[in-house]
Image: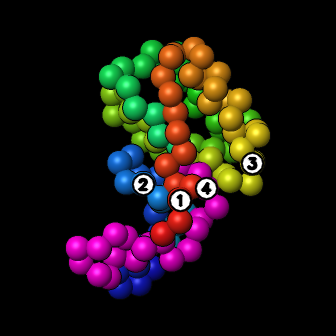
Amino acid sequence: VGEHTYELLSSPGLALNMARGDIICTAIPDQHVEVVRRGGNFCIHVYADELPQDAVDTLESEVQTLLGGTLDGRYKGNLTLAVPASNGFEAIRPVFDRFREATGVQWYYANIYQN
């Protein structure tokens, strides 16, 4: 986008407070990244040692078809998903709660914080 300014093309798996589509600035060394503009997505994280492939497939399918979201990253049992915030919490929660009930693994929003 510009010098020290970037648009995230996927939601980060370890960094909090950012999601796909956000515009971020990294101009000041040794300081947190600043979110300049929100891209309209929630980043949702799942951390586990391992996850059954069928549960991941079901979650990815439901996130895509019911919420218009994406599975942005996976490493072993860790998942990072981007879901349009326009769906609202009430529509998002049941999809991820079904995943939790099927796997016993908790999920959480990684970017509903202020800078």
SS at circle 3: loop
Query: In this figure, which residue is indicated by the disc labeled 1?
Result: 113
- Cα separation, mark 3 vs mark 4, equals 10 Å
42 in magenta:
yes
Tell which circle, 3 or 1, labels the residue nearer the N-terminal end.
3
- Cα separation, mark 2 vs mark 4, equals 13 Å
Which of discs 3 and 4 lies nearer the camera? The answer is 3
Which label number is shown at residue 16? 2
In the image, what residue occupies the spot 41% across and 84% down?
2
Which of discs 1 and 4 lies nearer the camera? The answer is 1
SS at circle 2: loop
Q: Are marks 1 and 2 in contact (CB under 8 Å)?
A: yes
In the image, what residue occupies the spot 34% across and 76% down?
26
Query: In this figure, which residue is indicated by the disc labeled 4?
Result: 41
Residue range in magenta is 24-43
Left or right side of 86 for 14: left
Tell which circle, 3 or 4, labels the residue nearer the N-terminal end.
4
In this rendering, is residue 82 above or below 96?
below
Which label number is shown at residue 88? 3
SS at circle 4: strand
Amino acid type for the residue under numbered disc 2:
Leu
